[in-house]
Amino acid sequence: MSHQELHLTLARAEAGMTLARTLLDTQGQVLMVQGSKLSDATISTLRRRQVTELWVLDPQSPTVDLQAQKTALRQYHQERLARLFRHIGNSADDRYLLDIMSRYRGSEPS
């Protein structure tokens, strides 16, 4: 499951928020990794390191089940291909084209 991301200034960051993206300094060094929880101490440290903005997970956004989204999209593509190829013949060329389109769309041929 996944939350939406929020781009915040460090001044708006609060203890308990979760980083949505890895936080790097100006030299590209990792300061905090994605998924880390912010605390008052880490926010103070980031302020001293002159970090001005960061990405956090939005606690107000509903969680999104990415696997369910992928399954629904795959189902949509299967149904769409079935409709587009509803008059397909049994020739090897027709089946080959359907197979290629099915693999391209991430679904199995019907």
Image (spheres, rainbow, N blue to C red):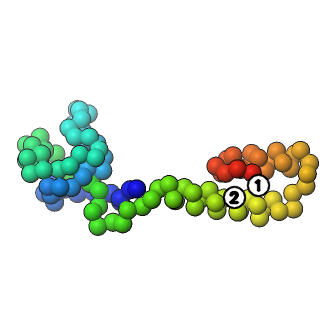
Q: 21 or 108, which lies in front?
A: 108
Dot label at residue 26: none
Proximity of marks 1 and 2: CB atoms separated by less than 8 Å: yes
The x and y percentages for residue 7 are 27, 57
Question: Marks 1/2: CA distance?
Answer: 7 Å
Is residue 2 visible in the rendered image? The answer is yes
Image-based side of 51 in relation to 109, left or right: left
* Residue position for label 2: 78
Q: Quadrant of the N terminus?
A: bottom left
What is the secondary structure assignment of the residue under circle 1?
loop
Callout 1, which amino acid?
Ser
The x and y percentages for residue 44 are 7, 47
Is residue 47 visible in the rendered image? The answer is no
Classify mark 2: residues with Cα within 10 Å, few (<14), some (14-19) or many (20+).
many
Q: 23 or 89, which lies in front?
A: 89
What is the secondary structure assignment of the residue under circle 2?
helix
Q: Quadrant of the C terminus?
A: bottom right
Please report whichever mark, 1 or 2, sits nearer to the chain's N-terminal start.
2
Marker count (numbered): 2
Callout 2, which amino acid?
Gln
Image-based side of 27 in relation to 48, left or right: right
Classify mark 1: residues with Cα within 10 Å, few (<14), some (14-19) or many (20+).
few
* Residue position for label 1: 110
